[in-house]
Amino acid sequence: MSTSEFLKPWRVLGFGKHPEIGAAVQARLRAAGLAATIVVLTDDEDGDARLVQELSDAEYDGVVIGSFVSGQDPQLPPTEETTLWFNRVLNIIHAHAPSARIILVRNPGDALPAISRVLE
C-alpha cells in the first residue's frame, strides 16, 4: 500500500522558499487526496504577512514547514538568519493557528510520510 492510501482528507498549509519545489509538492499532496495549499514565503515582513493571511483564510490540521526554513535539510545546514526565520514562523503559527500540528520535512519527498506521521 502506498502512503496516500492511509491519508485522511486533512487540510494542510505548507510553505518553503522555492516556487518550483512548492508546486511539485502541492501537486503530490493533492493527488494523495489532501486539501493542500503550498505557498512560497520570503524572509521578511511581506512573507510574515503572507503567512498570517494564509493561516487566517482557513483552519488547518497541519502546517508543513519546508526543510530550508526549518534547517532540516542535511545539505543546507541552518544559519543564524534561517534560525531566526524559523523561530519567527513558529511563533506566527502558534499565534494564528494554535490547534494546527507543526510538520517538519527533511526534503520534498518526505512531505507525505511526515504528514502521515504527525497527523495520524
Image (spheres, rainbow, N blue to C red):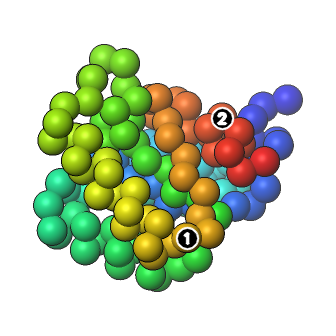
Report helix, strand or loop for mark 2. Answer: helix
Identify the disc placed on residue 107: none
Q: Is residue 72 visible?
A: yes
Disc 2 residue type? Pro
Image check: 55 left or right of 12?
left
Q: Quadrant of the N terminus?
A: top right
Rendered position, 68 above or below 17: above
- Name the residue beneath numbered marker 1: 98
Question: From the viewer's perspective, is 35 left or right of 13?
Answer: right
Q: Nearer the viewer, residue 17 or 32?
A: 17
- Classify residue 68 as left or right of residue 109: left
* Up/down of 90 relative to 5, above or below: below
Of marks 2 and 1, which one's residue comes earlier in the chain? 1
Question: Residue 46 at x, y = what percent?
Answer: 17, 69
In the image, is residue 64 above or below residue 97?
above
Quadrant assignment, res 75: top left
Type of the residue with mark 1: Pro
Q: Residues within 10 Å of mark 2 (few under 14, many from 20)?
A: some
Give residue 113's mark: 2
Q: Where is residue 9, by image quadrant?
A: bottom right
What residue sits 34% from the left and 58% below the top?
A: 89
Asked if 55 appears above or below 22 in the picture, the reply is below
Q: Residue at x 22, y 64 (%)?
A: 47
Percent from the top left, x then y, of residue 12?
Answer: 57, 60
Residue 5 falls in image quadrant: top right
Q: Choose mark 2 or mark 1, whichever is in front.
A: 1
Is 107 in front, or is 96? 96
Picture coordinates of residue 101 (x, y %)?
60, 57
Looking at the image, which residue sits at the far bottom? 57
* Mark 1: secondary structure: loop
Is residue 18 something one can see in this rendering?
no
Residues tagged 2 and 1 counted as in contact (Cβ below 8 A): no
